[in-house]
Image: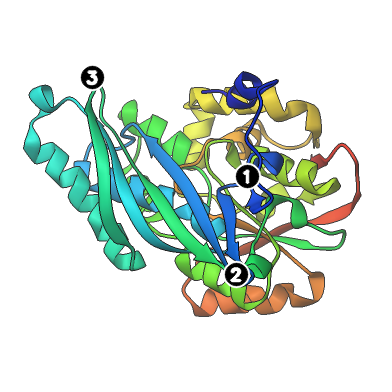
Amino acid sequence: MAPGDLEQALCGMDIPYDPNVLAGLAGSEDAGVYRINESLALVQTLDFFTPIVDDPRIFGRAAAANSLSDVYAMGGRPIAAMNVVCFPIKKLGIAILKAILEGGLDILREAGVALVGGHSVEDDEPKYGLSVAGLVHPDRIMTNGALRPGDRLILTKAIGTGIIATAIKAQLASASSMDAMIRSLCTINKKASEVASRFHVKACTDVTGFGLAGHLVEMARAGKCRLRIRSQAVPVLEGAVEGASMGLIPGGGHSNRKFFGSWINLEPRISAETVDLMFDPQTSGGLILGVPAERAREVLDALAAEGVDPASEIGEVLDSDPEGHLEII
């Protein structure tokens, strides 16, 4: 679905309200958060998608890492998950399904998350992901809308997975770029989230289908502020620039640019390839952290010490802006 489709479909509906909902549909948050008591809240999310790689076990790993990410982006600790499976069992057979599920279990074991069930349906195209529950202290939630003027923006993973996946489909991706993409896809955001929580970071989102620029616009709009990022400071996966130069842009990249473009000011000197990367839809992308300027160096050092690489300062929050805009220079 294109950006905004779900919001448009829900427009005008009577959405059930509960004062214990601390994060939900408002503010385009990554996951829902429900307060259980003064010291405990439940984090809930669900995500699944079609294969972006041919290897079923790697697909399972990537899908599971992507599903857990929304809990990490809210500052939560995922504790339990349920499989969400759509699969053409008669066409592809049990061995491929088993490999996908084994990939998911690889990630759950790494994250220390229990598998407690799931649901499957027969479908013409494989789809896999997880419904995830996590826990967080109500005072330690990280949200899209908590940016403040002066904050520095830190990105914890390189971008470019969408373009490289498109290059793979066109059989134009190098082996090294495929390896770089797979490493990124299968890296969970646990350590990055833990570092952010240790430093009491309040503003965070993860970079997924709306691309880096789209998710930054969501943060700017939710926080009513103006952001600026330096495109040359954004880490990029090996092979992604080359893929963009060949025009291997996924359809979601064009949709992102069309939807979010009115909130974005692009400096004219930026190359077409760089612009495409800013809107490239990501799978299992990194976190964007909004960190007070005086703590940014400490946070970067702590991320490096935990092996979160590449973690880079890519921009800052300039000032208040009721409409929420993004400058890319």
Mark 1 in CB contact with mark 3 (< 8 angstroms): no
The secondary structure type at the circle numbered 3 is: loop
**Going from the N terminus, do you reach mark 3 or mark 2 first?**
3
Residue drawn 8% across the image and 23% down it: 90
Amino acid type, callout 3? Asp
Q: Which residue is mark 1?
A: 24
Up-down relation of residue 254 to residue 234 (above or below): above
Name the amino acid type tagged 1. Gly
Q: Disc 1 and disc 3: Cα gap in Å?
A: 32 Å
Locate residue 191, reporting x and y percent.
Answer: 48, 70
Please state the horizontal and vertical placement of residue 56, each as a whole percent of the image: 20, 41
Give 73 or 235, whichever is nearer the viewer. Answer: 73
**Residue 112 found in image quarter:** bottom left
- The answer to whether mark 3 and mark 2 are in CB contact below 8 A is no
Q: Is residue 248 above or below residue 29?
A: above
Assess disc 3: are there few (<14), some (14-19) or many (≥20) residues with their C-alpha within 10 Å of its C-alpha.
few
Q: Quadrant of the C terminus?
A: top right
- Tell me, yes or no, if residue 329 can be seen here: no
Q: Which mark is residue 8?
A: none
Secondary structure type for disc 2: loop
User: Residue 280, how many percent across, how many down?
Assistant: 55, 35
Residue position for label 3: 124
The picture quadrant where one finds residue 17 is top right
Among numbered discs 1 and 2, the one appearing first in the sequence: 1
- Residue positioned 58% across, 47% down in the render: 30
